[in-house]
Amino acid sequence: MAAATSPRQRRRICPQAHQPFVPACHFDVTSGSGGRCARSSSCRCCGGDPGAGEWSLSESRGGTRREWGTSSMEREGGKNAAVVAVVTEPRFTQRYREYLEKQKLLDRQHRVAKMPDGTVALPVLGEALREQHLRELRNCVAPGSTCIVTQLLDPVPSKKAQSCSPAQRLCLEVSRWVEGRGVTWSAELEADLPRSWQRHGNLLLLSEDCFQAKQWKNLEPELWETVALALGVRRVAKRGRVSPDGTRTPAVTLLLGDHGWVEHVDNGIRYKFDVTQCMFSFGNITEKLRVASLPCAREVLVDLYAGIGYFTLPFLVHAGAAFVHACEWNPHAVVALRTNLEINGVAHRCQIHFGDNRKLKLSNIADRVNLGLIPSSEEGWPIACQVLKQDAGGILHIHQNVESFPGKNLQPLGSSEMEKEHWPYPQQIITNQGTNGATGDSRRKTLPAATKPEWQRWAESAETRIATLLQQVHGKPWKTQILHIQPVKSYAPHVDHIVLDLECRPCPLVG
């Protein structure tokens, strides 16, 4: 219940109260300037300094009271976000509901709640609620009723909300909020909403092709708070195209929140990184799982394009590599890589080489080399040959985007699956069943049904080029063998991201 206050006071919310649902500081002020913190002069949020804030009206019983503190974002532990609600006596509930529905203020995503003192709380769209509405409820709709605005910290979703998909819920919440701001909702705006997104903990990463209409600009920054509330996050970012700067820096803009650092857990491995500075591809999960299962015990590995540790960490944590030399020239990725090595407990088995890997001084050390760069890692092939052990050789994992040719009947016979444009492809694709010592021609007479001819042709070309480089680097002939071609993902229409496992061994000396 609202306690009597006299004279009438104004309150504003401490702008420094960052943590949701910790009661915000309120400054009791009798004039338009100055004031003191109602909680404490040594408030942990603001030190008692009013600063700029959000003004709201506080009146005695019979009037209204607003008590919302910080933004209604997702609570710790993944619980539902708080919602604004109008509280009144049970006998006035139906009148309130009818009025709120007529004014398009009723929040249909949450259930009406019964309060401990017997009153009833009707969830409302708080952004659209005005003092005028509260006065009409109190004076016209139900004279003599209690009219208090509060927050439900643990709102119960309605049956309708529970059956909505996240995209439907976003559309419903944003459209209501937009109409509450006096903007006409249109098919154009609805078509401009995202249908999918990436979620990193409490940060939502939107794609570049949404919220492009000019009308959205006039609704910022509150628009992003509405998006965050609808999808249960605290921060919102939007990505653009990857910058062609050699470090593949993502063009990501932070729309809501004060930093872009997130944590993602993949196959038991923790990755921390700044989404505004570093790439993270969910589509590479199959390859990360595959390399995690490789037998790398007692092996030394060189990862020429380590990034934040996408493949470095699976090789260390799960595949059991004895040591990894991780090469990376994006300074932001290097910061994240160091952090990820530490938090996963493998920093003592990895050395980071910061800078251009084409200038790497290492040689004759690697049992295995990972070249995880697309669209092509070809610039790294000479250094990959250089770091392989001269006496024993090793295996190269070469990533590449390979273009297919639509409309041409190049699929191998009996491969109906390959006529489909999208994944999945079978997990195990063996492209070379030959034994060591067989000639190249005899090893390539037939193709497994699941392998695209374009993949095989590229793999054979890469094998020939690598064999030449190995002889140039080491001064003696080497033999190479295609062990495996692994599809990772469909990168673009008719472009496949694949990985070639190429075995490279020095030829034994004759005589």
Image: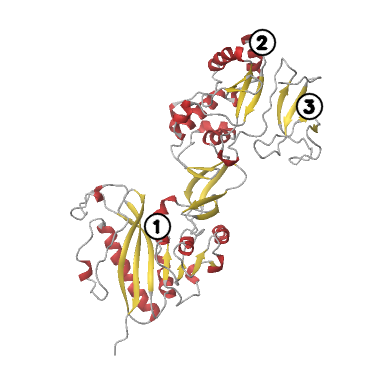
What is the number of the mark on residue 32? 3
Judged by depth in the image, the label closer to the viewer, 3 or 2, is 2
Q: Position of residue 405 (x, y in %)?
A: 26, 52
Residue most extreme to the bottom: 511
Among numbered discs 3 and 1, the one appearing first in the sequence: 3
CA distance separating discs 3 and 1: 62 Å
**Circle 2 — which element?**
helix
What is the number of the mark on residue 139? 2
Q: Residue at x 55, y 21 (%)?
A: 106
- Label 2 environment density (alpha carbons within 10 Å; few <14, some 14–19, many ≥20): some
Among numbered discs 2 and 1, the one appearing first in the sequence: 2
**Circle 3 — which element?**
loop
The answer to whether residue 296 shows anywhere in this view is yes
**Circle 1 — which element?**
helix
The answer to whether residue 182 shows anywhere in this view is no
> What amino acid type is highlighted by mark number 3?
Gly
Q: Residue at x 60, y 38 (%)?
A: 75
Q: Which residue is mark 1?
A: 287
Q: Position of residue 7 (x, y in %)?
A: 81, 19
Q: Is residue 277 left or right of residue 290?
A: right
CA distance separating discs 3 and 2: 27 Å
Q: Residue at x 53, y 15 (%)?
A: 102
Locate the C terminus by quadrant: bottom left
Q: Quadrant of residue 412?
A: bottom left
> What amino acid type is highlighted by mark number 2?
Asn
> What amino acid type is highlighted by mark number 1?
Glu
Locate the N terminus by quadrant: top right
